[in-house]
Amino acid sequence: MAPKTSGEKDDWMKQLDAELEKQTQEIMKDAAELQTQMGALNKTLICDFDRIKERFDKQRVFLTMEPQRSVYAQQDDTQEKWDFKNEFRPEEIRNIQLIDRTQEQGRMGDSLKVWYYNDNGVVRMRMIFEYCEGEHYYKYAGWKRVFGQFVIYDAALSDVEIDMVHDKMAVVVKAWYESHLRHNREVLINALKENFEKGETFTE
């Protein structure tokens, strides 16, 4: 049971409570809208990545995908088509990636990645291509693989333009695919250098 208060204090508390309730509803609405946007975008990107993987598979270029198809898909009776599982929640996915498993030409680990991050309270989507630049020997750590990144797309979630994402992604995928057909990884690296901004470099 709440203690008795004076009328003035009671009015102050009612006003504060009303403001807090309004704030709560606004934030919940914003969060729900972000979840809806993220879910729709993730479904599109997962479909895109799945189809890209199938195209590479036909050429016997094997990529792995995260999330795996078993997480989001249910196959039809022919096993040739799939649809999203009813229980799959695309808005909960924070990372989507295709990773090259080819051993030759240092391709192992070449990957197209999408993730979400928070920048001063704004949720952003970033797509990068990550690749191994080679190995370097460190005195106290030994040999390490050096990875570089190219930024393919980066925008606030609310500002993502899927047509632009597709245009930029097509540049990467076509060069990636051609580089495998020609057995020349430089086709891919040159296309990345010509079209996209260099991102971070790190070691593993």
Image (tube, rainbow, N blue to C red):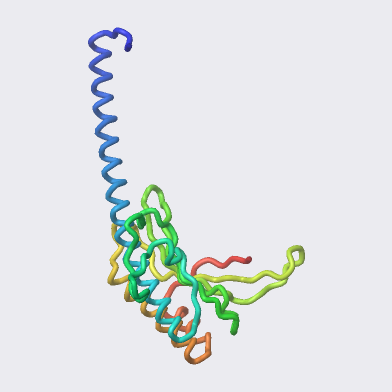
Q: Determine which quarter of the picture holds residue 21.
A: top left
180 or 139, nearer to the observer: 180
Side of 165 relative to 11 (left or right): right
Question: What residue is rendered at 35% in x and 57% in y?
Answer: 90
Among all residues in the image, which is located at the extreme right?
139
121 or 96, nearer to the observer: 96
The percent position of residue 61, horizontal first and vertical second, equals 49, 82
Q: Determine which quarter of the picture holds residue 41.
A: bottom left
Q: Quadrant of the N terminus?
A: top left
Side of 30 relative to 96 (left or right): left
95 or 187, nearer to the observer: 95
Q: Quadrant of the C terminus?
A: bottom right
Question: What residue is rendered at 28% in x and 71% in y?
Answer: 163
Among all residues in the image, which is located at the extreme bottom?
182
12 relative to 4, above or below: below
Question: What residue is rendered at 76% in x and 66% in y?
Answer: 139
62 relative to 65, above or below: below
Residue 150 visible in the current orientation: no
The percent position of residue 181, horizontal first and vertical second, equals 47, 90
The percent position of residue 147, horizontal first and vertical second, equals 58, 70
The percent position of residue 63, horizontal first and vertical second, equals 49, 75
Residue 142 visible in the current orientation: yes
